[in-house]
Image (spheres, grey):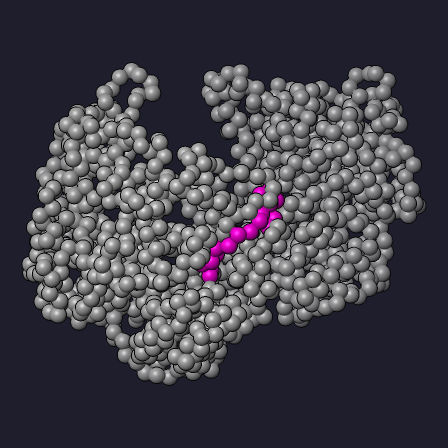
Amino acid sequence: MERIPCPHCGPRPLAEFSYGGEVVPRPDPEPADDATWGAYLYVRSNPKGPQSERWVHIHGCRRWFTLTRDTATHRILDTPLRKEEA
Amino acid sequence: MAKAKEMTPEGNTVEHGGFDPLAADWRDRLSQSGTATIQVDAAPCQAQLTLRGDPADPAFAKAVEAQTGLLPPPVANTLTADEHCRLLWLGPDEWMLLAPPHQGALLLSGLTVAFAALSPATNAMVIDTSETRRALDVWGPDAVQLLERGCALDLHPRAFPIGRCAQGLLAGLPVLIAHLPRRNGANHPCLRIFARTSMVRHLAWWLVDALAEFRRPGK
Amino acid sequence: MEQPFRLKAGGRIDRTRPLRFVFDGKGYSGYAGDTLASALIANGVHLVGRSFKYHRPRGILSAGAEEPNALVQLGLEPRLVPNARATQVDLIHGLEADPVNCWPNVRRDVLAGLGLAAPLMPAGFYYKTFLASRHLWRHVFEPLIRRAAGWGRVPEDPDPDVYTHRHLHRDVVVVGAGPAGLAAALAAARTGARVALIDEGTEPGGSLLGQTRTLDGHPADQWVAEGREELSHLPEVLVLTRTTAAGLYDDGTTVVAEERLTDHLTSHGGHGPRARLWWLTSKTVILATGAHERPIVFPENDRPGIMLASAARTYALRYGALPGKRMVLFTTNSAAYESAIDLQSRGLRVEAIVDARPDPSGPHVDMAEALGIHIHKGCAVTATDGRHHLESVEIMLLSPDLRTVQAPRKLIECDLLCVSGGWSPVAHLYRHAGGQVEWNAEVRGFTPVPGPGLPRVVGSAAGTHALSQALERALTAGAEAAREAGFGDGSASSAPRVTETDALDGMDLWRVSDQPGDGGRAIGRPGHLSFVDLQNDATAADIDQAHREGLTNVEHMKRYTLTGFGTDQGKTSQVNGAVILARAVGEGPEAARLTAQRPPYTPITFGTLAGRRVGGLLDTVRETALQDIHRDLGKNGGAVFEPVGQWLRPRFYPKAGETMDRAVARECRAARQEAGLLDASTLGKIDAQGPDVVEFLERIYATPVASLPIGKVRYGLVCKDDGMLVDDGTLARLEETHFHLTTTTGNAAWTLNWMEEWLQTEWPDLRVRLTSVTEQWAVLALSGPKAREILAPLAPGMDLSVEAFPFMTWRAGAVAGIPARVFRVSFTGELSFEINVPWRYGPALWKALLAKGAPLGLTPHGTETMHVLRAEKGFILVGQETDGSVTPRDLGLGGMLKTKRDFIGKRGMARSDLQRPDRKVLVGLRTDDPAQVLPEGSPIVEAMSSARPLPMLGHVTSSYLSPMVGRVIALALVKGGRERLGQTLQVPLEDGDLAKVTVVEPVFWDPEGKRRDG
């Protein structure tokens, strides 16, 4: 059972969180052509290694945050700083 | 319709009507399930207001204090309290105010007016969410052990002393647990567990089931 | 004689507490403190099972978790336990155990004949047979093999036992309570840290139990007892026995372990839970999981009576049970000499020590020689004999390069052959956490490679064989781990002085060749097998064959030969198999790779994993404030419920003897002709407010927001960025910057969280506050021509006239004396009021409405009637008419979309594919047969033809018998459906029939919408 570091509540069990997927910048909708919008909707880099991704502490403080996780080892490499520690 | 007369922890007698998912038969089941080392009961119904605002804005904290007598707890997963009210951390800009039922309406209007005078940047808000959660109290030397049966939070007194609160999962459903110094005026601490009103009977059932394990020899 | 192989004294068994048990239909006795294996050995029983593939007689190999052979079936239905390791089954009075893989019994197994067929079933047999002939496989081999294999029987009835879970947080968790684990736990616990020490055995002590060795001049048992005593006085220390660490999870800080609570007390269900699953979350984890002695691969190495040297010693010293009378030790190292010496001191006669090393040395070698034990140096066991039990071994000289063996052959009579091929550190948990192991030439085993974020490993699990060193390092590790968790300064007390065993100065002998150096014929009789994996009957020759066929990756070899599969997961075979493969490739052990290791370490019963999440506790059940009323309604058993997400909602309220169809027809008619009442409290409700709330909702909703005046309500559509509809509901403007939103029941949590995601991640500048108020408001939907008449007397302060309270507006006021928000929205097409009151007053409102309304025909209805009523009106249900690939335009709702302003989904809908004219769109279907309800999801085709695949035009999304329309109605998504109005299409049904349907407008009731105002 993985533990996810919530920037507000500290490390908590995975079950308290919901996964938001890889962080993908949203293109400006108006000028974006179909290919650009299609890529934003469907294309993910799916790296074997570090990935910047979104999580939400859905059963805790309900806050969204971004962290970096190594998809091969599940190790969390870069965690958002906790308020108490900052 | 169930009419209940209750003592609030602060000692005020109030009357309220209406449906309570933990009314008579469930309270009996809970109290009968208790053991020598664990007691469970429905918590008194209280007014629950959700407060939102920018904790960095001193005017916000001042307005909260002026209306409630309490400052928003500065540390995550802690609470502040006086003899009337409690203010529990829910998120970095979100708190739950617990108050005696008859004070709920007054606090709601007082805070609404006070917040309206704040800078729009603070985006302060108060809303009555008294109906959305129902709480249970668990106390006794083995209370933590009972909850550890279905809760991955660290509830050991070293990590979760009196004055701490935390949201997480218990029995697979989302809860807010607060470690309170007193229960119903009685002089013993308790763990107060808030669950969504629609889920609280499931939680009560789970607790009754879990307690069976502690009543058997050799637990 | 009872227990003829039991020693008169010694061991950690209680001779005052004899226990009777049955094995393979025969009664025996043992003592409290025995395992089933030690009790069998005390009774001289060695034949305990038959092998999986060849049904060869097998005996007890080990004394622990690594046991591949001694698998037994325990208990009676419904408490059958298949494949229990006899070496870990605590003996209890009345225990009934049977061997597995044999019939009718272990001595006269009729399938043993398969052994003769061994050469016919080489590695890859299954794959090749299957590929060669599907027919032969399915009709001949598979049934035969399934019957022959078995591996125990599982219970057919529900598990009657109770299982429990417990989560616990610790500063230090130590896995394994042998000398190193005990020392580490002591050092950590002395700092005041919260410590858990867990061990799979019945008591802490591990290899020290029953030892002859001394620590600080005292017997090892005493050091163990003192350690236990000290731990028991430290308040923050938890010691768990009979608790197996099954897995160490991703980040290496959560140990999941199974504690067996009652199996050692009773076989017929005890008081309280049978087992407990622990989730031990720890700041630091120390692994002291020990090492498993390795068997040696030599011809006929699988007979009963062939045992690991350390296991034989454990049986004699810890259990006072002698595993034989005359023994031979076959070893590659000096450490195993200690076993021979100890066994001789307990009365066993050591016939010979066969040492593969040409020139063994060391204190214990000297001691053995001094005791007069004959040592055959540079020799190996090359064959064994004995039908059901070992009778003799044959030894030969090893050639210097170990590739062949040489005469003279020598036959030694014996009934016990102890083997030791070295030690394999137990690194399973370390590898679960992502740790690597590599060949360690000094230890002659695969040891953990330290790395950042990985648990500490101490004792023989780390390859530290010398006891003094293991204790010293473990004490340091314990103190260091505690310091890391914030306790103590990292300093530890000094380790006790110990009498040291011989160093592991072994040699590598991975496999005894069956080829004589003189070029003569292979040793022994035909069909002689050198087993690598005893549980799966995988031989060294199988691995050779895998290599010859190009399977040089160890994972491929494993799947081809089955080496390492099964309930023991190759604990005694994995290393031998991997190195034999590496050598076949021409490499040494350092090039060998071990197969992946996954939890659980030993099998766990499903009941333990499920815990109390069974039956009604499986998932959270959500109830509205009216649940008790629904249950009691009609006093005929109440409502029939259906799950909607986690909610349990009334589906219909049958009267006595009423079928669902009749009940729904009655409820539908009432709602259309008089009035219906629905508990709609499960609707998701969100309070949205803040200075920027209008801007936020304009971005979120595909429908306009800003133009909505205070006091009015609007239907809203929510799309994702791909343009597909994900939710619908209503928006009511309460104040200038304050809205009350509703979502579908099933999407409530998702929609709120999704809105929060946009607010928190993409638009943090917007000042908006969202609050779930689902349980703040109980909602009763009062609907039907008499709705106004029923409500009016209850809401005297509220003008309900069409003029004062028009459609799609909301009003605040008192209903039945309860403060309420009333919304004039309609999901039925009839005049409808959705009355919102504080949750607790839901029942009071329900009762008040029925008291007034029942005389006028007000009838409660459930979700089924709601579905029929809304389908009659062609109102969509998200999740029924939509599936994530349907846009508002596809549903005929394009006219509601904003044309100018941007919103989520706008760009997505503009994609060329979503503009195609032949997209599937919502239409109604009129069935030729007025009573033919179409199964939801049924395909729709133009006509049946032989074309494959048959071109599909779409599918049925909803279909009900409509009592008001007087026939079946259906909604469907059909390609270019608007252009097909009036066309006849076909719906193939399950029974092969075709239903003829006509495409019609998707509104079957009141198409002009005249009824909504009453």
Q: Nearer the viewer, residue C79 or C604?
A: C604
For the question of whether residue B133 can be seen, the reply is yes
Tell me if C207 is positioned left or right of C937 in this view.
Answer: right
Tell me if C303 is positioned left or right of B182 in this view.
Answer: right
Q: Residue C962 occupies which quadrant of the picture?
A: top left
Residue at 64% over, 38% down:
C596
The x and y percentages for residue C456 are 71, 53
Q: Residue C293 occupies which quadrant of the picture?
A: top right
Q: Is residue A62 magenta?
A: yes
Q: Nearer the viewer, residue C347 or A63?
A: A63
Query: Which quarter shows the N terminus of chain B?
Result: bottom left
Residue at 62% over, 26% down:
C560
Residues rendered magenta in the picture: A57-76
Relative to C573, does residue B146 appear above or below in the rendering? below
For the question of whether residue C116 can be seen, the reply is no
Q: Nearer the viewer, residue C902 or C783?
A: C902
Relative to C292, does residue C988 appear above or below in the rendering? above
Relative to C170, does residue C74 appear above or below in the rendering? above
Residue at 40% over, 61% down:
C767
Q: Residue C899 occupies which quadrant of the picture?
A: top left
How would you classify the magenta stretch by its main secondary structure?
Answer: loop
Q: Nearer the viewer, residue C67 or A3?
A: A3
The x and y percentages for residue C367 are 90, 47
The x and y percentages for residue C638 are 21, 56
Q: Is residue C506 magenta?
A: no
Tell me if C627 is positioned left or right of C241 in this view.
Answer: left
Relative to C122, does residue C239 appear above or below in the rendering? below
